[in-house]
Amino acid sequence: MIDDERFDALMESVVHGFEVGGVAVLVLGALAAFVHAAWSVRSQGAAAAYENARRNVGRAILLGLELLIIADIVLTITVEPTLASALALGLIVLVRTFLSFSLEVELEGTLPWRRAARDEPSSTRGQAQDSPGA
């Protein structure tokens, strides 16, 4: 059986791994987005390359934030289970959730609950409204 000190050390390593992974996703994702944009300027034009770079950087930020949230959750529930750390986690999750939501709305151009209506073909929407069961 594993003792408390070894468990804490293991969980700190897990947290460290998620933190490193989150930062790596942020850095490598942004670099990849910029490199891809530089290559696509010639074929797609500057405006399209810029939009693609913004979208890809946003995706990297979203994924990196998710990994960092995992690290905060694991740290709070395993290593530092105090009221102060739980409150700090709550605040961090609120801020990161707001950032994630804002980025997703900016990337998709619409609110998540309106996305299905936007993506649905117009012919399907008309059929659903005209059907007897609707």
Image (cartoon, grey):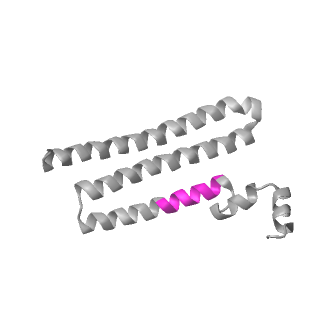
| Overall secondary structure of the magenta section | helix
> Which residue is painted at 74% across and 55% down in the image?
119
Whether residue 15 sits left or right of residue 43 in the image: it is left
The stretch drawn in magenta includes residue 42:
no
- Quadrant for the C terminus, please: bottom right
Task: Report x, y in % for residue 4.
Answer: 14, 50
> Which residue is painted at 47% across and 40% down in the image?
25
Task: Report x, y in % for residue 11.
Answer: 25, 47
Report which quarter residue 84 is drawn in: bottom left
Question: Which residue is more in the foreground, 124 or 23?
Answer: 124
- Quadrant for the N terminus, please: top left
Task: Report x, y in % for residue 106.
Answer: 64, 56
Magenta stretch bounds: 97-107
Whether residue 43 sits left or right of residue 89 in the image: it is right
Question: Which residue is more in the foreground, 47 or 86?
Answer: 86
> Which residue is painted at 63% across and 46% down in the image?
55
Whether residue 36 sits left or right of residue 134 in the image: it is left
> Which residue is painted at 56% across and 34% down in the image?
32
Report which quarter residue 24 is drawn in: top left
The stretch drawn in magenta includes residue 101:
yes
